[in-house]
């Protein structure tokens, strides 16, 4: 079962809202975020920073801007610390 929420990130001096879902498994979790109609998975690493990846290789051509991914990761870090 996923807990759904909205995450707000600042990108190019504008606040943007993204639909997200917290997925728990075992002792860890991942967060699925829809960014411009592309599902991006964020997972915490050993230092509790978030790394992003695209679960579907077909979406690689339409990957979101890396700066936007960093903005979302920063917003997640603030929300989950």
Image (tube, rainbow, N blue to C red):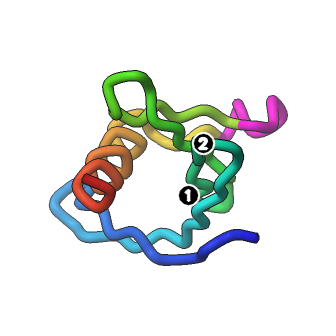
Q: Against 65, is 14 above or below?
A: below
- Residue range corresponding to the magenta coloring: 55-62
Q: Which mark is residue 65?
A: none
Quadrant of the rendered image containing residue 9 = bottom left
Displayed quadrant of residue 65: top left
Q: Which residue appears at 80% of the width and 29% of the height? A: 57
Question: Number of labelled discs?
Answer: 2
* In magenta stretch: residue 1: no
- Residue positioned 29% across, 61% down in the render: 79
Q: Where does residue 16 sit, x and y in percent of width and height?
A: 35, 70
- Which mark is first along the chain, 2 or 1? 2
The residue lying at 67 percent from left, 36 percent from top is: 54
Say which of 22 and 26 sits in front: 26
Looking at the image, the residue that sits furthest to the top is: 46
Q: Nearer the viewer, mark 1 or mark 2?
A: 2
Q: Position of residue 11 (x, y in %)?
A: 27, 55
Label 1 crowding class (10 Å Cα cut-off): few <14, some 14-19, many 20+? Answer: some
Q: Is residue 17 above or below residue 59?
A: below
The answer to whether residue 77 is above or below residue 52 is: below
Query: Is 11 displayed left or right of 33 in the figure?
Result: left
Q: Report the quarter where the N terminus lies.
A: bottom right
Rendered image: mark on residue 35:
1
Secondary structure at numbered mark 1: strand
Q: Magenta: predominant secondary structure element? A: helix
Q: Secondary structure at mark 2?
A: loop
Which residue in the protein does label 2 denote? 27
Foreground residue among 44 and 28 = 28
Where is residue 7 shown, x and y percent of the image?
40, 69
Of 8 and 27, nearer the camera is 27
Q: Nearer the viewer, residue 1 or 65?
A: 1
């Amino acid at each position: 079962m996923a807990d759904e929420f909205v995450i707000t990130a600042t990108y190019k001096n504008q606040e943007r809202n993204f639909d997200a879902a917290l997925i728990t498994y075992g002792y860890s979790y991942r967060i699925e975020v829809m960014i411009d109609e592309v599902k991006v998975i964020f997972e915490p690493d050993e230092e509790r920073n978030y790394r992003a990846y695209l679960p579907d290789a077909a979406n690689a051509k339409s990957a979101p801007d890396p700066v936007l991914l960093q903005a979302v990761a920063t917003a997640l870090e603030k929300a989950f610390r």
